[in-house]
Amino acid sequence: MRWRWAVIETVSLTAPDPGRGTDQLVMGRCWLGCDPERVQMVVWVGPVSACGPDGLATADAFACLDHVRRLYAMARADEIERDRPPHLADRVRGHP
């Protein structure tokens, strides 16, 4: 069987639903880089929508606490970089 690789055209990770209890840890799989077969404690990070050649796929995404911390740190770093005055920017946004 030949695998058909699809290019994902759009990905959206939106803000968590306030009524969902987003801080509750559950057993599941981390969507952000851990071994997909490993079941561990994860937290809901939001709904994900991905559009590809076979149409739209939506699901609830979960992540382990290490990846949630990394995602948060990356978002904060980007926010700080975005708010920096242009004359102080000495590197490309989003890169160390």
Image (cartoon, helix red, strand yellow):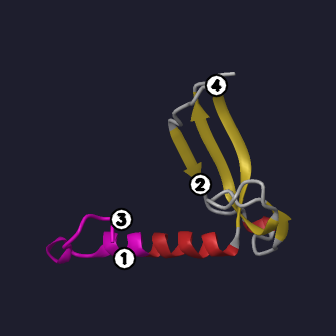
Residue 69 in the image: x percent, y percent? Answer: 59, 76
Q: Secondary structure at mark 4?
A: loop
Residue 27 in the image: x percent, y percent? Answer: 85, 66
Residue occupying the point 52% across, 40% down: 10
**Which residue in the structure is indicated by mark 4?**
54
Q: Is residue 68 above or below residue 9?
A: below
Q: Secondary structure at mark 3?
A: loop
**Which residue in the structure is indicated by mark 1?**
80
Q: CA distance from mark 1 to mark 2?
A: 20 Å
Residue occupying the point 19% across, 73% down: 90
Left or right placement of residue 55 versus residue 94 in this view: right
User: Tag 4 or tag 2, which sits nearer the N-term?
Assistant: 2
Q: CA distance from mark 3 to mark 1?
A: 10 Å
User: Tag 3 or tag 4, which sits nearer the N-term?
Assistant: 4
Residue 45 in the image: x percent, y percent? Answer: 68, 63
Point out which mark residue 13 bears: 2
Q: Secondary structure at mark 1?
A: helix
Residue 40 in the image: x percent, y percent? Answer: 80, 68
* Mark 2 or mark 4, whichever is nearer to me: 4
Q: Residue 17 or 55: which is nearer the viewer?
A: 55
Q: CA distance from mark 2 to mark 4?
A: 19 Å
